[in-house]
Image (tube, grey):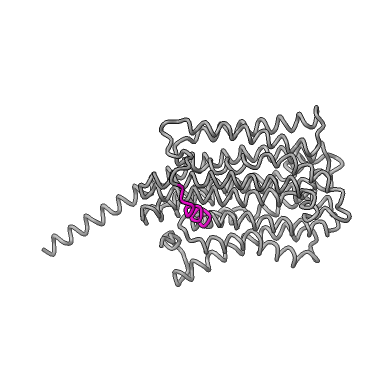
Amino acid sequence: MGGQTANAAEKSEKNESEHGMTKRDDIAILFRKNAVGMILAAMAAMLGIIVDGIITGRFLGTQSMAAYGLVTPIVNLIMVFSGVLSSGSQIVCAQRLGAGDKAAARRVFSVCMAATLVLSIILMAALAFFRDGICVLLGAVGESAVLLQPASEYLLGMLFSIPAVLLLFEFNGLMRLDNDPNRIIAAVVTMTVLDIAGDLLNVFVIGGGMFGMGMATSVSYTIAMIIMLFHFCRKDAVFKPSLRGLKWRDLGEILLAGSSSAVGSGAALLRNRALNGIMLASASAVAATAALSVLNTVLNVTSCTMVGVGLTCSMLAGMALGSRDTLAAEALVKVAIKSALIVGGILFLLLFPFAPFIAGFFGDGQSAEMVQLATRGMRIYSIGLVLYALNTSFINYAQGMRRIAISNVVCFLENFVWIVLTALALFGVLDTDAVWVGYVAAEVLTFLTVLGIVGVKKRGFPNKAADYVLMK
């Protein structure tokens, strides 16, 4: 009898080991498939933003580039709403699908679409009527009052893109769950090409200034949204908007699940406002603000790369949570760490040596000071990219596991508290370098914060993947 029990235990252990290996293989394949697609889509979208910055800096001047950077917090504000709705709906839908409840997943999607349309109308009206006052609040006063008109004109042009911006980010994750990833690539590539063409047409033919730059963005995003909407003509689509059976408590669950994205975007809004203020108070003022705008444009590229990895983490974590699969969760942690190290390392190797070349695209001979400051900023910022990749993966994984408090706290510390405190503390000594150093310090302090939080839960130093599973 004892021998039979031992054999049974040995067999069970062997099966569990084989099951675990299968899970690791499945998770690795799913992770690569989804992360690569999301990164490519995000990179294509960011290419348009980069070109916006390059064309603005080169052909409309340093002042227009500074105005472009001044309104970055408004873009961050839109991303607050976009982030909470897109990541929240993706996590909740993935959890519902993981539990085998397609009807609930469809209902969550429909609630998200209805909320998005209402929100779009409110945001567009606010920008249309209060854009001048918003630009003043962002710092277009005093010696920087010259930035008011170009900043206001840009906001007027880009406000028409708000519905498309919100919906595109929501569709990005959900269409992957609905097995239609190629449509995302097609829409984003079309958007990027049209945005670049519109920017060039505006500068060399129309002469529409910053308003024209904003309109080019609006037109390209809207056409991309139309391409995405054809997804709902598919007969096998799981997600189709419907007003039947809506339960508005689902919206509360979406907002809760996606709150980390809102915290991240909101913190970025506060951060950019604070850092713009520091730069405007520096010895270089407008040139320094324009250099920060260049860095923020590059930061958007690195961020979107990690957004691809992060959203994949949160989606697969949500599915693991829905099916209560701890083996899949542990495998996901291992794959996420490995991917973050690889992606962060590649970004550093691309950015640090080529910083002068990249910064040079954003200015000409009359923008030499801006280019020099931006080059220095990019090189210092790149030092923290590996830690940034690890921190972002942890935040998104915790979000997918519905560890909302942990995700929100770490996200806010990383995106606002650590960087702004460091910049303010060092500004009197380092001037503009205080901002660049702040980016690196934020990642170091956030990484230590993650180790501390997980260590407290484990009651010891977290040194293996199982310590980070966090499944309730």
Q: Residue at position x 45%, y 39% from top? A: 239
Kindly tell me whether residue 389 is visible in this rendering: yes
Left or right side of 173 for 118: right
Query: Which of these two is toward me, 14 or 120?
Result: 120
Q: Residue at position x 69%, y 58% from top? A: 270
Secondary structure mostly seen in the magenta stretch: helix
Measured as percent of width and height from the top left, residue 387 is found at 58, 56
Q: Give above or below for 339 relative to 457.
A: above
Measured as percent of width and height from the top left, residue 368 is found at 84, 45
Q: Residue at position x 48%, y 33% from top? A: 232
Can you say which quadrant of the picture contains the N terminus? bottom left
Measured as percent of width and height from the top left, residue 277 is found at 78, 58
Q: Most extreme residue toward the left, as rendered?
A: 1
Kindly tell me whether residue 337 is visible in this rendering: no
Q: Which residues are magenta?
A: 246-257
Measured as percent of width and height from the top left, residue 424 is found at 75, 65
- Residue 309 on the magenta span: no
Q: Most extreme residue toward the front, as rendered?
A: 244
Query: Which of these two is toward me, 456 or 460?
Result: 456
Q: Quadrant of residue 219?
A: top right
Q: Most extreme residue toward the right, as rendered?
A: 143
Q: How many marks?
A: 0
Can you say which quadrant of the picture contains the C terminus? bottom left
Query: Which of these two is toward me, 391 or 253?
Result: 253
Q: Most extreme residue toward the top, as rendered?
A: 205
Q: Give above or below for 467 relative to 145.
A: below
Left or right side of 104 for 144: right
